[in-house]
Image (spheres, rainbow, N blue to C red):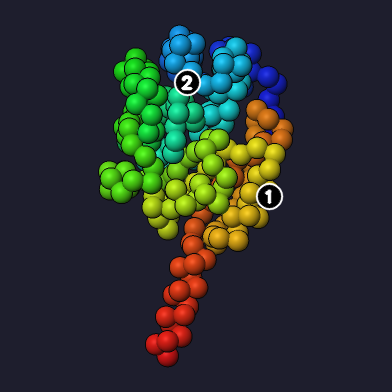
Amino acid sequence: MPPHPHITGPEAFAAAFLVSRETLDLLSLYAELLGQWGRVQDLVAPSTLGDIWHRHIADSAQIFPLGQGANVWADLGTGAGFPGLVIAILGRDRPGFKMHLIESSNRKCSFLREVARCTGAPVDIHCMRIEDLATQRTVKGVELVTARALAPLASLLGLARPLLRTTTRALFLKGRDAGKEVLAAQQVWRFQSDMTVSRTDPDGRIVSITHLQSLEDLTRDSDQSGIGQ
């Protein structure tokens, strides 16, 4: 899908993503709250506050149609809610839809709770570290995992692995080095991948990951199989 023109505000977003007026109003409220909190809480880079609709909301929203069929999502290191909280607002009318937002910062979790309260977004907010066992025990039944600007792909797969079952997919927003990150990750992991051109950045990519396995585990299983023969 070709990149859209720059999303300058709510009306441009509505034209590009074909959302309802109610959804647009909720996203507008989110943008307003981010502007209010962001100026004092440093929730996102200050240089991006004037370009919220393109840099944050549209960038996050482009993932939603790629995850059709998945009702239980988890967003790793969600920060100020990107992409997870935007996706939750887009999916709020879908029966059974739930977004798990995983964020370790108490300050950012307070902001996420306020936006969720004001918008009615179907989210569970987990104010804990991704790699903690408590997180992995709490977040269950995930069908799709997302993350944005969190870590290089090889490390990101390590964080996501406890949530990635055989049928689970991951969609990660990546920049111009997405291809290099995939190659580096293949030195540690075995997986199937696909890339979609970003709708907000012609150099960006959305990396889809399925069938994740650790090469270390595969090697160990192979060695143990050989011992038993």
Instruction: Give the percent coordinates (x, y) of residue 103.
Output: 39, 33
Which residue is tagged 1?
Answer: 180
Instruction: Give the percent coordinates (x, y) of residue 199.
Output: 65, 30
Image-based side of 227 in relation to 196, left or right: left
Which residue is nearer to you in this view: 190 or 90? 190
Q: Residues within 10 Å of mark 2 (few under 14, many from 20)?
A: some
Locate the C terminus and report the quarter of the image it occupies. bottom left
Q: Which amino acid type is marked by label 1? A: Lys
Q: Secondary structure at mark 2?
A: loop
Q: Residues within 10 Å of mark 1 (few under 14, many from 20)?
A: few
Q: Secondary structure at mark 1?
A: helix
Q: Judge whether 50 appears above or below 134 on screen.
A: above
Instruction: Give the percent coordinates (x, y) of residue 98.
Output: 35, 35
Looking at the image, the residue that sits furthest to the bottom is 229
* Residue located at (33% from left, 37% from top): 128
Locate the N terminus and report the quarter of the image it occupies. top right
On the image, which quarter does residue 135 sit in? Answer: top left
Which residue is nearer to you in this view: 24 or 185? 185
Q: Which mark is residue 137?
A: none
* Residue located at (53% from left, 29% from top): 60
Q: Judge whether 53 appears above or below 149 on screen.
A: above
* Residue located at (34% from left, 21% from top): 110
On the image, which quarter does residue 8 sit in? Answer: top right
Instruction: Give the percent coordinates (x, y) of residue 13.
Output: 58, 18
* Residue located at (38% from left, 29% from top): 105
The answer to whether one can see residue 199 in this image is yes
Which residue is tagged 2?
Answer: 43
Label whose residue precedes the other's in the sequence (2 or 1): 2
Image-based side of 132 in relation to 62, left or right: left
